[in-house]
Image (tube, grey):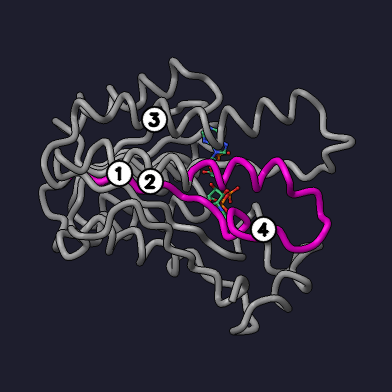
């Protein structure tokens, strides 16, 4: 229970990687708020699973594309849990398209959800984070390399933006003893990237381990970064991709 008494906000945690992060933080004793866009029922199920660990939990509907909703989700977390120690910016969307064909609507959605919301949530959280505070951003192994021609340039851009943002913010907050890191998942079996979906075979073939990862593979690293044991890690990008970029 190394996170006992800590208060966490995990964005986009009704399903997939975010749900696993919320449950893993709760297993270590943290109280957890989660956001979601549409899946109210799934979010309530995550809240119930989190509460089963004996901690407090709350689900907040907040579209990451909506600046006011993002700000309000941070403030509501602080009000409900009595403060904030750990912010995990996980909510993200994938819109596959070539640059030639991508619509302005898709460009805006990718930038607003994957990048602007991370900046706004962090900005809103900073005044609440004390010594030992944590900001953990969920990037992607596509931040480093963009294999294949499956319409990834703009999505990859949003994820590589998180690396520079995390490094710069780590410098800004270092004197306050707050760490900022980015975890870069490889292919993790979720609704966004199902292991048996259309890209499953090719994405599996580029890993060194020959398999997709599980949501827990990412949740374990996030939990470690949130722990005091990771106090000297900041400004880092930790890639968890089964060797896909090796
Ligand atoms: P999923 O699509 O499986 O789940 C996405 C989650 O984010 C859901 O809880 C969803 O809520 C929420 N969400 C989506 N859009 C919004 C929004 N506009 N506002 C608020 N919440 C939103 O994704 P994953 O779990 O696979 O991905 C999680 C993160 O990991 C993302 O940032 C993704 O880019 C990144 N990633 C994933 C990889 C993978 O292989 N799976 C690889 C590399 C990075 P709701 O249920 O309400 O829609």
In the rendered view, tell whether residue 20 sits above or below residue 158: below
Q: Is residue 182 magenta?
A: no
According to the picture, the residue beneath numbered tag 3 turns out to be 60
Q: Quadrant of the C terminus?
A: bottom right
In this rendering, position of residue 109 left or right of residue 31: right
Counting residues from the start of the chain, the first of labels 4 and 1 encountered is 1
Q: How far from the left and from the top, in percent, is residue 63?
A: 52, 26
Mark 4 or 1: the one toward you? 1
Please name whichever residue, 84 or 50, is drawn nearer the observer in this view of the structure.
Answer: 84
According to the picture, the residue beneath numbered tag 1 turns out to be 170
Q: Residues within 10 Å of mark 3 (few under 14, many from 20)?
A: many
- Determine the secondary structure under disc 1: helix
Disc 2, disc 1: CB below 8 Å?
A: yes
According to the picture, the residue beneath numbered tag 4 turns out to be 193
Disc 3 from disc 1: Cα separation:
27 Å
Give the residue at x 78% y 71%. 202
Mark 2 or 3: the one toward you? 2
Disc 4 from disc 3: Cα separation:
24 Å
Give the residue at x 67% y 25%. 108
- Determine the secondary structure under disc 4: loop
Q: Is mark 4 within 8 Å of ligand 1?
A: yes
Q: Which mark is residue 167?
A: 2
């Amino acid at each position: 229970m190394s996170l006992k008494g800590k208060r966490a906000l995990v964005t986009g945690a009704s399903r997939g990687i975010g749900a696993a992060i919320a449950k893993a933080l709760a297993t270590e004793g943290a109280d957890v708020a989660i956001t979601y866009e549409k899946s109210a029922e799934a979010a309530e199920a995550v809240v119930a699973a989190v509460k089963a660990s004996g901690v407090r939990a709350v689900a907040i509907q907040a579209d990451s594309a909506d600046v006011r909703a993002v700000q309000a989700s941070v403030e509501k977390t602080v009000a409900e849990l009595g403060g904030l120690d750990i912010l995990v910016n996980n909510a993200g969307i994938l819109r596959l398209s070539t640059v030639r064909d991508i619509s302005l609507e898709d460009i805006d959605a990718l930038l607003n959800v994957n990048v602007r919301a991370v900046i706004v949530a962090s900005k809103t959280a900073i005044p609440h984070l004390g010594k030992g505070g944590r900001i953990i951003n969920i990037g992607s192994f596509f931040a480093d390399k963009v294999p294949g021609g499956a319409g990834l340039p703009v999505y990859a851009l949003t994820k590589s933006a998180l690396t520079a943002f995390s490094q710069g913010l780590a410098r800004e907050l270092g004197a306050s003893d707050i760490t900022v890191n980015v975890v870069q998942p490889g292919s993790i079996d979720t609704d966004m990237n199902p292991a048996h979906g259309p890209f499953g075979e090719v994405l599996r073939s580029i890993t060194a381990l020959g398999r997709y990862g599980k949501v827990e593979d990412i949740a374990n690293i996030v939990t470690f970064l949130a722990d005091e044991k990771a106090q000297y890690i900041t400004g880092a990008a930790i890639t968890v991709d089964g060797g896909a970029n090796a």
